Image (spheres, grey):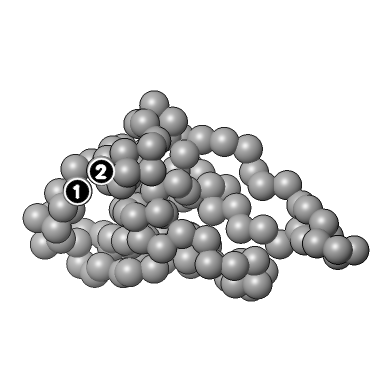
Amino acid sequence: MTSLAIVERAYRGAVEVAYFDALFLGIEIHRQLGLDVLLRGEAVTYAVDGPAPEPFLVGKRLVETLDAPRADLLRLRDLGVGIRVEREDLAALGLGEDRLIDGAEPVAAGEFAARWPEYDRIFFL
């Protein structure tokens, strides 16, 4: 058995990611325990294919610590982590399944609740 990480909340600020973010924690959880990831809510945008955010100026300060969760998600995928994305949340944000990164599997909302017994532990990141 393995672990399941559920991520519902999207970007919470550049300061948070400057130190440690939820998907980076997922990499360590996978190393120790094995992991699947379920993205719900606004976090489904993490699995949408697109360019990384570019630094920008705020006054005279260059902000370079922008959250780039897709990079960590791609790393998780490449490590063999299953990536699931709730269809209904994609649709609610006007995004189609065709926009997902390779390896991300769309699933119906609530489908994973029935599968929780398959996991040793559930993390809400």
Residue 41 image position (x, y, % from top left): 34, 55
**Total marks placed:** 2
Marking on residue 16: none
Residue under label 2, please give it: 88
Q: Is residue 86 above or below residue 12?
A: above
Number of the front mark, 2 or 1: 2
Quadrant of the snapshot with the N terminus: bottom left
Q: Is residue 82 left or right of residue 61?
A: left
Residue under label 1, please give it: 109
At label 1, counting other C-alpha atoms closer than 10 Å, the crowd grade (few under 14, some 14-19, many 20 or more) is: few
Q: Is residue 81 visible?
A: no
Q: Residue furthest right?
A: 60
Quadrant of the snapshot with the C terminus: bottom left
The residue sitting at 47% across, 48% down in the picture is 46
The residue sitting at 63% across, 38% down in the picture is 51
At label 2, counting other C-alpha atoms closer than 10 Å, the crowd grade (few under 14, some 14-19, many 20 or more) is: some
Q: Nearer the viewer, residue 125 or 117?
A: 125
Q: Residue furthest top?
A: 98
Q: Is residue 39 visible?
A: yes
Q: Are marks 2 and 1 in contact (CB under 8 Å)?
A: yes
Quadrant position of residue 47: top left
Q: Is residue 115 left or right of residue 41?
A: left
Amino acid marked by disc 2: Glu
Q: Secondary structure at mark 2?
A: helix
The residue sitting at 60% across, 52% down in the picture is 68
Q: Secondary structure at mark 1?
A: loop
Residue 48 image position (x, y, % from top left): 47, 39
